[in-house]
Each structure stands twice: as structure tokens, then as C-alpha cells.
Image (spheres, grey):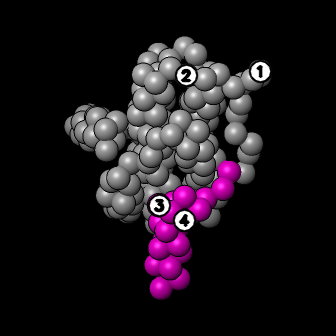
Amino acid sequence: MDAFFIAADNALRTLSGANRAFRPCPAPAGPPITLEADEQRLSGALMRVNHVGEVCAQALYHAQSMTTRDTTLRRQFETAAREETDHLAWTQQRLRELGARPSLLNPLWYGGAFAIGLLAGRAGDALSLGFVVETERQVERHLEGHLERLPSRDVASRTIVQQMKEDESRHAAAASAAGAAELPAPVRWAMRAAALVMTSTAHYL
């Protein structure tokens, strides 16, 4: 029952926007830049996709920390989740600044990611860590693509995405060092296909 209430509390805080960052939001030097309408729309759509990714990260890491019996690994998952909480709060703040909204399907994304995290955790710590490595590598590539697509004048969004990319790279390296097993190719392909559906939908919804 305790685990159920903790999981429910985490879901409510994530979906309601009640999570708060532990670190200050990365910000560029100099005064804010006013974007053109088309630039603002594009940045809003891309940051909404990034926000969805952080909603999913909260669900994944929380589910995996619940299923592992290794206390050291649980602390590692919890530490990574705290940094993902920063990302969640930063992207949410940037969405507000851009006059954009979060995805309407966030409850669906959270529920699906939580279920996947439980399955990965129950498959064993090595495979669970392997799932983290593959997920973070895919996210890192995705963020690199957003750095290429974000308007060059939107320095505020680009600064946030760059810090997120660096954090995701560290999470993947930490999971690999902790004993991650390489996932089978069909699993990696399925993860990429699911991520493509999610990011394409979240761009608009």
C-alpha cells in the first residue's frame, strides 16, 4: 500500500506541475529575446515534446526504483530522477514563457512509461539498467536534433536543451558503469518506434 500511495503521489505531482527544480533553470547571459510568431510556435512545439519526455522519465525512473532490491541501484535511480525533475520543471517554465501548453495526452504518456518501467525492473537489474542506457541514448540523439531545429534566436530554450543533453549523457554512462546489459535489437527498434509515435503526436497534442 505504501508503494501504491508513493506512486500515486509522484504521478499527481508530475501531471499537475507541482514538481519543483532542485537546480536553477539554465539561462543565457543578456536580456530576453522576443521571438517572431513562427519562431515562438516552433519552439513551443519542440519544448512540449521535451516536456513529455520528462513526464515519461519521471514514470520510468520511479517504477524502476520501486522494483529493484539493490539499495545502491535504487539511490542511483532516485538521483537521476531528481535531475529529471529539474528538466521537467525547466521545460514547464519555458512552455509558459512561450505561451504554449503541455501535451493533452500527458496522463497517457505517464501511464505507459510507468508500465514499461515496471516491466523493465522486473526483468532484472542488468536489463533494467540496459533499458536506461538505451532510453538515455535515444533521448540524447533526440535533444541533439532539437538543438538543430530550434530557432537560432531562441537562446533560452537552446540553453535548457543543452544542459538536459549533458545530463542524459551522464545518466547513460552511470547506468552502463553499474552493469547494464545490452538490449536485444528488436527491443531497441521497438523503443525507437514508440518514441517516434510519442514525439510526433506530442508536437501537436
- Decide: is 87 above or below 59: above
Q: Which residue is mark 1?
A: 30
Asked if the residues shown at circle 1 and circle 4 are in contact, with their CB atoms under 8 angstroms apart, the answer is no
Identify the residue at horizontal 70%, vertical 33% (top origin).
26
- Decide: is 130 above or below 146: below
* CA distance for labels 3 and 2: 28 Å
Q: Nearer the viewer, mark 3 or mark 2?
A: 2
What is the three-letter code of the residue carrying label 1? Gly
Q: Quadrant of residue 91?
A: top right
Q: Position of residue 92 (x, y in %)?
A: 55, 46
Q: Nearer the viewer, mark 1 or mark 4?
A: 1
Identify the residue at horizontal 54%, vertical 58% (top origin).
17
What is the three-letter code of the residue carrying label 2? Leu
The residue segment tinted magenta is 1-21
* CA distance for labels 2 and 4: 31 Å
Q: Which residue is mark 2?
A: 35
Q: Earlier in the sequence, mark 1 or mark 4?
A: 4
Which structural element holds mark 1?
loop
Q: Is residue 34 magenta?
A: no
Whether residue 155 is visible:
yes
Q: Nearer the viewer, mark 2 or mark 4?
A: 2
